[in-house]
Image (cartoon, rainbow, N blue to C red):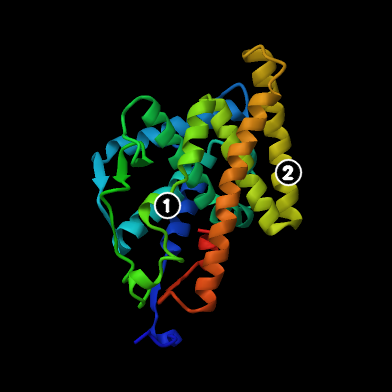
Amino acid sequence: MDPKPLLPNEKSFINIQYLIDEAIKIMDLGSEKPFSAENRLKKLAIGLRIVRDGAKNREVGKLTKIGKAEAIGIWERDFLAVVKWLSYFSEFEQLPRSMKITLLKSIWHVWTRLEKLALTAESRKKEKCRRNEIMLDKNSFYDQKDFEVDISWCTKYPKEKLKFFFDEPHHWMDFSIIDSIIALDPTDIELVYMMCQLCFQYAGKRHQGEILETCENFLDLLGNDLHDYYTNYVKCSRYLGRLSQMIKINNMIQEDIRGRRVKRELAETFQIFCTEISHPEMFVDT
């Protein structure tokens, strides 16, 4: 017999306010390792390396199962990684706290999607991971062919009846995007520009108004930095080909996000989930 629609008091509650509180602490303290750089993209590129290197302090590991504890652990790691990375973007740091929190809650899962794809592409190129392995951060990974998914904590339905809503591990990451990143072989500067373009375009479209204006301003500034990088550092004034490849990869990720949005909306319509989260806006399009 299929589960009956759940009443509000039959749902479990996950409070992630502590993540917002921790993000505020990090933002108030500023970047972990302050330094100056030639421009915004250069600073963000160095900041990305610092954030990635922070994973080295954790034990190297292969994730073989994901349930409630593992999922929450990944949310924590990914969300705080974005907070730390954006602490190296001065214009973001100058925003009102409320707008920074709104942006963080919107873009963290978008940023981490590209970050995992880029780390996997880099590791494959260096022959540090096999084709069926996906990097979670610089120090951990999972094998798509050797991975158990426990969804009993978030739904009362059996997993075999929810194949449309819950992708199998081998469908979590689009191999064609990884292959495209490997073919592009982006520099650190190009990668952080891709991250910013993907995240701020997404947030601007999602929120509109003042946030859209802010995100467009960010992208104008970063676009100028990218032009300066190509013309004065790389000494290449004809870079539209590489830029179009970068945008194409980001568009592929956006398309995947839109596909997940449809499934998420249907799951909510049919009351598939048996959990409530304190900040559901953080998980739109996840």
**Residue 88 appears in view:** yes
Q: Is residue 131 above or below residue 79?
A: above
Q: Position of residue 63 (x, y in %)?
A: 27, 49
Determine the residue positioned at 36% across, 40% down. Answer: 135
- Local crowd size for mark 2, using a 10 Å CA cut-off: few (<14), some (14–19), many (≥20): some
Mark 1, residue position: 171
Amino acid marked by disc 1: His
174 versus 267 height, above or below: above
In this rendering, the answer to whether 201 lies above or below 284 is above
Q: Position of residue 139 (x, y in %)?
A: 31, 38
> Gap between marks 2 and 1, in whole Å?
32 Å
> What residue is drawn where x is 45% and y is 85%?
8
Residue at 37%, 40% in the rendered image: 137
Mark 1 secondary-structure assignment: helix
The residue pinned by badge 2 equals 216
Q: Name the residue furthest top.
A: 235
Three-letter code for the amino acid on which mark 2 is drawn: Glu
Q: Quadrant of residue 277?
A: bottom left
